[in-house]
Image (tube, rainbow, N blue to C red):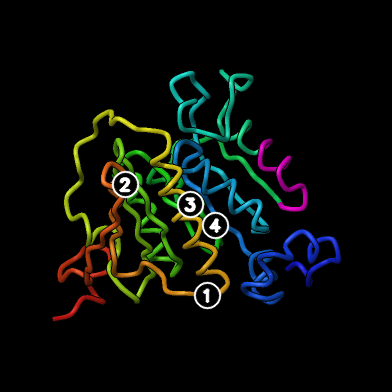
Amino acid sequence: MPAGLTPAEIERYSRQILSFGEEGQVRLKRAHIVIAGAGGLGSPVAIYLAVAGVGRLTLIDHDRVEATNLNRQVLHGDADLGRPKVESGAGRLRALNPSIQVEGRRVTITEENVADLIGQADGIVDAMDNYPVRFLLNRVAYMRGIPLFHGAVRGFHGQATTCVPGQGPCLACLFPEVPPEVVVPVVGVTPGVIGCIQATEVIKYLTGEGELLTGRLLLWDGLAGRMEEIVAAPRTGCPICGRDAPG
């Protein structure tokens, strides 16, 4: 486990240490966060967790960078076309903050490998674009007792929540049926907004600051410039966390 902060780290993170102290910064340094997806949502999440000093990041994605990605996936640029996203993404993150550990796993998340991919991480960021994999991540997060930081986008609209086992509904409570898989429109600023919210949730969770989105689904309407939220409770009969549901 990493020791305390070095003088260089105290200087680098001095402005945020004013918010949550050196103890909070040490918690970030000691943390391991898995980011499932190195695309539109995963890009801002990874960038802001890297510059915040989260000590170990694991990027999981099986795709290569394509031209159609570049309106929103800011981890990658024209020079990365054709490269595995985890390769270009990890390189970018190491350049942003050489003091952290970044691991890229170029693999498709499946029923068979999801538990091993998550390992002993302190939290999972759901930056995926399909619900079957989201539900796999949700199940592993619940089994391991770690939070799932969920985000999803469509056009100018997005949503985010944080699922903490035993403290509120899991993702399967909120979405009891798998939505159909379709190619959705995405305006680049939307995953920027939602990804930053997800990164904020991770930082709050690790430092113990503020109030998480547990039990609340935040909805972003970029066209109206408005945020709303839906309050939710564990769902009786949920196949993942039903034992925690009332009744």
Q: Position of residue 158 (x, y in %)?
A: 31, 46
- Residue occupying the point 70% across, 51% down: 101
* Disc nearer the start of the sequence (4/1): 4
Answer yes or no: do the residues labelled 4 and 1 have beta carbons within 8 Å?
no
- Position of the C terminus by quadrant: bottom left
Q: Nearer the viewer, residue 109 or 194?
A: 194
Q: CA distance from mark 2 to mark 4?
A: 29 Å
Q: Which residues are magenta?
A: 91-100
Q: Which mark is residue 196?
A: 3
Mark 3, secondary structure of its residue: helix
Image-quadrant location for residue 142: bottom left
- Residue occupying the point 31% across, 48% down: 225
Q: Which mark is residue 209?
A: 1
Q: Which residue is mark 4?
A: 119
- Residue occupying the point 64% across, 58% down: 54
Q: CA distance from mark 2 to mark 1?
A: 24 Å
Q: Amino acid at mark 4?
A: Gly
Mark 1, secondary structure of its residue: loop
Mark 4, secondary structure of its residue: loop
Q: Nearer the viewer, mark 4 or mark 3?
A: 3
